[in-house]
Amino acid sequence: MPFKPLSQALLPVLFSLAAGAAHADPAVIFDMGGKFDKSFNQAGYEGAERWKKESGKTYLEFEISNPAQREQALRRMAERGADPIIGIGFSQGSAIDKVSRDFPKLKFVVIDAEVKQPNVQSITFKEHEGSFLVGVLAAMASKSGKVGFIGGMDIPLIRRFQCGFEQGARYANPKIEVAGNMTGTTPTAWNDPARGAELAKAQFAGGVDVVFAAAGGTGIGVYQAAKDAKKYAIGVDSNQNHVQPGTMLTSMVKRVDVAVYQAFKAVKPGSTSLGLKEGGVDYALDQHNEKLITADMKKKVEAAKADIIAGKIKVIDFMANGTCK
């Protein structure tokens, strides 16, 4: 299939970005949802900005607005000599696989996907481990004995979050009930706050009083619904405790910022998987939620964290098992 040219809207953006940059500048391509989604993409943006501030150098960037732009943007960045080129999100995996073959002298990084090329570093996270911890806190905070999960796009990666969350909740309370919904089956599921709010309201009506959203920008609607209903919500990827203080019980932090920062400094081709032991995932405790986490809750979740790191608790990985059993 012949390569399609960039849209007229995309071309000027990339040309202008490239014009003011040195050939060896790195590049980061944010996926749908945008770099200010207050979640996954934004964590990557913050890592890039940290590198920029510390190094005094610049980087190229682009925000994907439709799937067709992924390969186009990667290819244009590569043609301009950007190195390394980082693709944020599993959806960029196939495009990076293709473009990295055509530019073997450049280094590429993909986050949340596996690409087996000699010039590509694949960085994934053990989301199930971090989700286990917030599941513990959710079950302990729940007064109804019912907690909920709202995912974004229904894919195995998000099922991994859900599976870890369910295991953590049942570890803290074997009798806990866990409700679950996915927002959709297309990439628009990452940026649909209205739908997120609808799903959350339905769960609250069913008795849920703590909900964990792993849904990108859609989560903003979940958190607002939780605030309105005076229920608890749990953030994801970035520390979102500040989004609705008093409503956010905690956040399952996924250090995409660290991954991008480290990759800008040095790419290590091959696969890297970051869990609790590596500091890649965790639960967030700060001034916004410290009054919501009791001493007993902290003791329980810290014990679980230590046992997971020590291998005493084996958290089932949905993506490895294909099931949560």
Image (cartoon, rainbow, N blue to C red):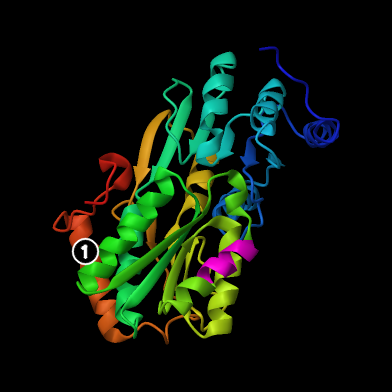
Magenta region: which residues? 193-200
Name the foreground residue: 199 vs 16. 199
Task: Measuring from the top left, give residue 265's x and y in whole percent.
Answer: 53, 39
Across and down, in percent, residue 158 comes to: 43, 50
Q: Secondary structure at mark 1?
A: helix
Q: Nearer the viewer, residue 123 or 165?
A: 165
Residue to which mark 1 is pinned = 306
From the viewer's perspective, tell me whether residue 130 is left or right of residue 122: left
Q: Is residue 55 magenta?
A: no
Q: In the rendered view, tell whether residue 40 sits above or below residue 80.
A: below
Q: Quadrant of residue 100?
A: top right
- Give the crowd class for mark 1: few <14, some 14-19, many >=20 residues within 10 Å: some
Q: Amino acid at mark 1?
A: Ala
Q: Is residue 146 left or right of residue 311?
A: right
Please tell me which residue is depicted at 64% across the width and 32% down the height of the picture.
70
Please state which of residues 259 and 128 is positioned toward the viewer in this rendering.
128
* Residue 211 sits in quarter: bottom left
| Residue lying at the far top of the rendered structure | 2
- Residue at image point 40% right, 62% down: 180
**Residue 47: percent from the left, percent from the top?**
56, 51
Count of labels in the image: 1
Res. 243 visible in picture:
no
Q: Nearer the viewer, residue 97 or 16?
A: 97
Q: Main secondary structure of the magenta part?
A: helix
> Which residue is pictured at 31% across the width and 57% down the height?
164
In the image, residue 185 above or below residue 225: above
Q: Is residue 149 left or right of residue 32?
A: left
- x and y percent of residue 88 in the render? 56, 42
Location of residue 290 with respect to 263 vertically, above or below: below
Q: Residue at x 37, y 38 (%)?
A: 272
Q: Is residue 27 visible?
A: yes
Position of the N terminus by quadrant? top right
